[in-house]
Amino acid sequence: MRYFEDISVGDAQESSKDYELTEDDIVSFCSKWDPLPFHVDAEAAAVTPVGKLFTSAIHSVAIAIRLGHQMQTEPTATVMGLGWDEVRFQTPACVGDRLRLRGEIIETRESASKPGLGIIRSLLTLRNHRGQTVISLKAAALIRQRPAQS
């Protein structure tokens, strides 16, 4: 188990596997959660500036979160997420894109109001196989400190 004390500013990881975005993935997710024509109809997407089917921003965020969970090599003593800041949607994720996540710890501090807990902030960056940033965001989480030895 990784506790707050095991996490340092500058620690970074990258997903070991790409997530390949398929037409079925996009249409299935977006039909339910963001059914704009250019997310669910290839013909409608073809006449947009993107020129082909692309997924919704929230689907890209969900993929980033999934990749983040998959790249953990051991469980972290996470209590809860505290929020996201500076969420940026920079390049659409399109059919056939292979997506990869990089996470880097950018801040750690002990909680002033919750003894035994610490707060970490991470920069998460989802890129496509061409190296273009699809999304980036800063995520904060509450992490348990290592229990005292008895």
Image (spheres, rainbow, N blue to C red):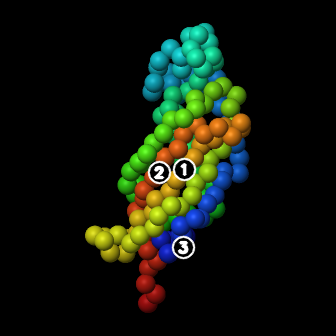
Q: Secondary structure at mark 3?
A: helix
Gap in Å between the C-alphas at discs 3 and 1? 19 Å
Q: Which residue is mark 2?
A: 138
Q: Quadrant of residue 10?
A: bottom right
The relative height of residue 124 versus residue 109 in the rendered view (above or below) is: above
Q: Would residue 42 be visible to someone looking at this image?
A: no
Q: Where is residue 69? Give x, y as percent.
A: 57, 52
Q: Considering the image in quadrants, where does the C terminus appear? A: bottom left
Cβ atoms at labels 3 and 1 below 8 Å apart: no
Identified by mark 2, the residue type is Lys
Q: Which residue is mark 3?
A: 6
Q: Is residue 35 left or right of residue 12?
A: left
Q: Where is residue 73? Give x, y as percent.
A: 64, 62
How many labels sit on residues?
3
> Which residue is pictured at 41% across the width and 70% down the height?
109
Q: Secondary structure at mark 1?
A: strand
Q: Which mark is residue 124?
A: 1
Q: Is residue 71 left or right of residue 82?
A: right
> Which residue is pictured at 60% across the width and 20% down the height?
50
Residue at the left extreme of this rendering: 113
